[in-house]
Amino acid sequence: MRRGGSLLSLFLASCTGVQNVLGGQGAEDTNFIRLFTVFMVVCTVMYLIVVAALVIAVWRKRTAALSVDDRKHHETSTAARRALVAWTALITVGLVGLTIASFFTDRSNAANGSRPQLSLTVTANQWWWDVEYNSPDASRTLRTANEIHLPVGVPAQVTLKSNDVIHSFWIPNLAGKQDLIPGRVTDAQLLPNKMGLFRGQCAEFCGVQHAQMALDVTVESKTDFDRWYAAQLEPARSPTNPLQLAGYRYVTTRECGSCHAIAGTPAGGQVAPDLTHFASRRSIAAGALPMNRGNLYGWVADPQSQKPGNHMPTVGLASNDLHAIVAYLEALK
Ligand SMILES: [Cu+2]
């Protein structure tokens, strides 16, 4: 009984929260939930009919074996033939019904993505997400990492690429999965219909840190989104005290800047997450750690013990450099 209770609570826990296929916060997810319910009901009814037919057949066989009456035997086989015809008709109707339901779900999903008002390019890397917001006006394009902000009710087109191996883009609360394949461009459509904080997750095993390849998703009002967008377009904040200045000097002249970019500074590396507004994000290292000072110290001092195998080396920083770098990164709001 207790085990049943804990299994039930585990099941219910998977039905709530930031990473939930039954959340229904996106148009595509809502369509899929509806289709899932239709399949579940039809298949349950079919299953119950099969079980009932099985019980009746066993029961009849027993009574028929006891009877030596030929006429009765003939009646039984006629009834069985009728049941078989009815069952075949029911299966046909059920399968055609499910096919039609799938067709309309696909059509509705295609219609949701037909007039996108926002264009993003998400590029997967072992093990982080590069996110670009595209615009015909070059001054309005922006780059961030491991996070997506979306205005509620606005259809977005997401172009998907991969720099290394096959990954899969999946924000369960909003939509289904889509693979990101090296050398090939795929796409996904997102139409969030409720505000909230969600979690995306790579859904294709892509190496040792696959599980720690997450994406913070914020669905907010158009006003909040525009405010966030405008802030992200700004160059990085300048250091405001000697400690931050020391951190700025280290990050822009030593190892960090050869991989990471910070807009408005000499740091221009393109192979690691953009850090321009790093401290405004909710997490560090693609969702591996919540954003706070303790985790930042742990990450910068020894990224290999935090997320073994990732491409950021542990460089053995002197403690004064570590304090300075953390102070500067914390200022990058
Ligand atoms: Cu993965």
Image (cartoon, rainbow, N blue to C red):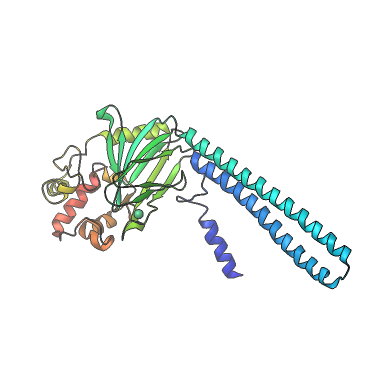
Q: Nearer the viewer, residue 160 or 182?
A: 182
The x, y position of residue 202, in whole percent, is 37, 52
Q: Nearer the viewer, residue 144 or 70?
A: 70
Q: Is residue 211 visible?
A: yes
| Residue pictured at 80% horizontal, 60% vertical | 77
The x, y position of residue 195, in whole percent, is 46, 40
Residue 270 lies left or right of residue 167; in this view the side is left
The x, y position of residue 173, in whole percent, is 47, 46
Query: Where 202 falls versus 52 (above or below)?
Result: above
Q: Is residue 25 visible?
A: no
Residue 51 lies left or right of residue 16; in this view the side is right
Q: Nearer the viewer, residue 200 or 125?
A: 125
| Residue pictured at 18% horizontal, 54% vertical | 323
The x, y position of residue 29, in whole percent, is 50, 43
- The residue sitting at the top extreme is 137
> Which quarter of the rendered picture does the C terminus lie within?
top left
Q: Quadrant of residue 2?
A: bottom right
User: Which image quarter has ligand 1?
Assistant: bottom left
| Residue pictured at 16% horizontal, 44% vertical | 241
